[in-house]
Every structure is written in structure tokens, then in C-alpha cells.
Image: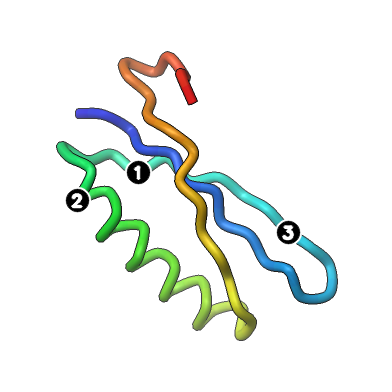
Amino acid sequence: MKQYVFSFYTEQGRTSVWDEAISASGMMEAFSKARRLLIRYKQEKGIPVRVRYKGVRYRHTDIA
């Protein structure tokens, strides 16, 4: 299984950025999991959250 790395960030007020590594067998599965995380973060924070794809990790070696 590969780890797809996504960067989540907010732009209102104080900018905050954090990365999430999502384990998935393919790109579509990773994007659907990232979308679910995005919806959850928007509800938790109450402000717009954006997401950006960074890259893929194979066997814990970062090539992003």
C-alpha cells in the first residue's frame, strides 16, 4: 500500500498548514479519503479549509 500525502491549510486569520499521509491502494481511494477528511476538518474548525496533493510515499521513503 502506498501513502498519499496531502497538505491541508486554512487562510482565514492565522494561516495554519498540516500534512496528512493517507494509506490507499490507488489514487481514487486516496482522493475520496482526503475529501472525507476535508469535510470533517471544515466542520470541526468552522472555517474554509483547502487541500493540496503533495505526492506519494513508497515504503516510508518520501519522494514528494
Q: Quadrant of residue 55?
A: top left
Image x and y of residue 21, in percent: 42, 40
Question: Alpha-carbon distance for marks 2 and 3?
Answer: 26 Å
Q: Which amino acid type is marked by label 2?
A: Glu
Residue 12 percent location from the top left of the image: 76, 75
Q: Quadrant of the N terminus?
A: top left
For disc 1, the neighbor class at 10 Å (few under 14, some 14 to 19, many from 20) is many
Q: Tell me the residue at 64%/82% (across/down).
A: 47
Instruction: Identify the residue position indicated by label 1 in the image.
Output: 22
Residue 43, horizontal then vertical, whole percent: 50, 83
Compared across the picture, whether 28 is left or right of 45 comes to left
Residue pushed farthest right?
14
The residue tagged 2 is: 29
Callout 1 touching callout 2 (CB < 8 Å):
no
SS at badge 2: helix
Q: Earlier in the sequence, mark 2 or mark 3?
A: 3
Please name whichever residue, 6 or 43, is drawn nearer the observer in this view of the structure: 6
Structural crowding at the residue carrying mark 2, measured as other residues with C-alpha within 10 Å and reported as few (<14), some (14–19) or many (≥20): some
Residue 11, percent from left and from top: 73, 68
Q: Earlier in the sequence, mark 1 or mark 2?
A: 1
Mark 1 residue element: strand
Q: Is residue 38 above or below residue 31?
A: below
Upstream in the sequence, badge 3 or badge 1?
Answer: 3
Which SS class for mark 3?
strand
Amino acid on which the number 1 mark rests in the picture: Ile
Q: CA distance from mark 1 to mark 2?
A: 9 Å
Residue beneath disc 3: 16
Question: Given the image, on which type of amino acid does mark 3 rest?
Answer: Ser
Q: For mark 3, does the 10 Å Cα neighbourhood hold few (<14), some (14 to 19), or many (20 or more) residues?
A: few
